[in-house]
Amino acid sequence: MRPGRWRPEGAVPIGPLDSERTARLDARLDALAKEIAALGCHLEHSQDPIQGVRLNVVGADSPSRYEEAYRLVISPAGVDLTAHTVAGLFRGLTTLAQWLRLHPPGCDGVVGLEITDWPDLRTRGLLLDISRNRVPKMGELYALVDLMSELKFNQLQLYVEHTFAYVGHETVWRNASPIRPDEIRRLGSYARRRAIELVPTQNSFGHFHRWLVHEPYRRLAECPDGVEHPFSPEPEPFSLCPLDPGVFSLLDDLYGQLLPHVPGQLLNVGLDETLDLGLGRSREACETLGTGRVYLDFLRQVHRLAANHGRRILFWADVALAEPELLPEFPKDALAMVWGYEADHDFKVPLQKLGDAGLKAYVCPGTGAWNSFTGRTATGLANAARAAVAGEDAAGYLLTDWGDHGHLQPPAVSWPAYVAGAAFAWNRTSAADAESLPVAALLDRHVLHDPSGVAGRVLVELGEAQAAAGVSARNGGPLFFAWMFAAKSAAERRGVGFTAQGLDAAQTRLADTVGALKHSAIGRADGDTIRAELAWAADAAHLGAELARIRLKVGEDVPLGDLGSGDRRRLRSRLEALVEALPPVWRRRSRPGGLSASIELLKRPAAAFGDEP
């Protein structure tokens, strides 16, 4: 903090700004102009901004980690913002706007301060799953980029299995409301103006079931007749066959269509969770050479294919790490992505193994929001913090936001992890004491714009409501599993062992947190949408709690069809209300493709109830 206050009046000069700087800073200048306007002033470009905002690019050579560094000084004489690059000015203007936001209209000037700041991790990304039925509308993707820019992320990945509109492959994406070439081109341009790189993704080995269930793609599968896998209730072909030349012709076509619309040097090719590798057409090769060797050979061919398109690959590291003795043979310019999503996940050991093999890696935690309806705040924040602490020498930090089992959680329940992940990646010191990060206050000030201080607390506490039930579940919320996995045995449901007291506590917290939203003052244009989405999510969690409560009476392993007719009617009635309420809430942000599939997943447990008597 510095003595004195800056008291802007009338026209606030800012500069110097040539055409290049103005073009690269326009998004931040617009945001700053809004905060200046809230103080009763307006920005005005000037080549000599006395008593205003003075921008200085010193241009000295600096290590890459300091490309976004800046020094911000606010004093009675105005604002001095100094950086090595225009990217540094961009981040400094973001901080300046946030500082002004903390000064209410009519205040006695802006409190003086001096900040010297830079990110600990050069690449700070967010991956959003758009392949588990929920594909955001373009306006929502733009809003996501704006939020990421506010939080100082600098990379966005949209996880694609089948949701890009490839020409000639309409059978695969026809009902998915995919991202179209012109849309991803516009999104990339929008992101660049906000200092964010859009990195294209196309999973290229496992997780190819959305393609392989269709002809003529089935013939490219490792197991054309299908296998059981956790991403479908029915057996399906899952992975591509690594020995089939037709696979590389297909991937070459996909990369050739996608990449020209997304400029850059990177391509995320996935290659994770090859669950059926060696179980079908590659069985003999895997038995002879080893499964790890067959995987490595396939990755090398994908690596060459991507290089032909001028791209460096990112790949998920789970399969490679299963046979670490092969790691030294992986292409040295391939970027491994180390993922793990629980509060206690150990990132250090796999990062060390990759580093010892000469491979650079991203560290990839998760928001914990998927498989939950309402989020898992504590898990997401702890996981994000552990990743940042372990990732001191990582090539990047990529926070993942998945949509398993129909992407039924609303976007807002991921926002606490967005705020925390961005903070931890920028400043790893904050991750060492993650519990002290004022996530709710940061959400209210910079995301929800709620001066009442209610909405941020609601998001954080709603994400803890299911934990109040006293039942632990990995990779999801216990009330989510209580309903969505209801037809499975107790051993397979992940969340069992509820008590009446625990369910009472969880349901009380669900009701109290959503009820508190009535007293919030969300300043965003989508405030009503946020309230509707969170109310739906809480109702869905209540459904899981009601079924868990019934099972307390009849036993964990009693088949759903053997529940009492009155219990089944009550559950059906609650489910019908949820199903009826979902489409109008979903369509506010998301495209229609995939909605019916998510509804079917939500309704599937009720099929085990049997016919009404």
Image (cartoon, rainbow, N blue to C red):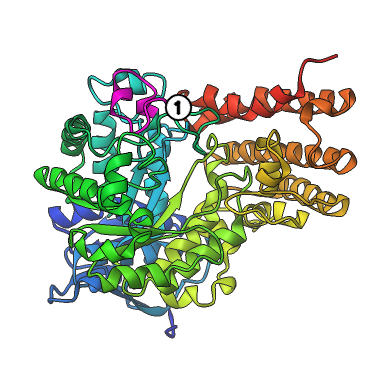
Residue 255 relative to residue 401: left or right = left
Q: Nearer the viewer, residue 155 or 454?
A: 155
Q: Is residue 518 magenta?
A: no
Image point 23% across, 37% down: which residue? 243
Query: Looking at the figure, which quarter contains the N terminus?
Result: bottom left
Is 217 colored magenta in this rendering? yes
Q: Quadrant of the C terminus?
A: top right
Q: Position of residue 336 (x, y in %)?
A: 30, 59
In the image, residue 174 sits, relative to residue 423, either above or below, namely: above
Is residue 99 visible from the viewing direction of this image? no
Q: Which residue position holds label 1? A: 591
**Residue shown at the point (71%, 45%) measured from the top left:** 479
Closer to the camera in the image, 8 or 556: 556
**557 displayed left or right of 451:** right
Q: What's the magenta region? A: 210-225
**Residue 140 on image: x %, y %:** 43, 38
Q: Residue at x 73, y 39 (%)?
A: 544
Residue 28 seen in the figure = yes
Q: Give the residue type at disc 1.
A: Arg
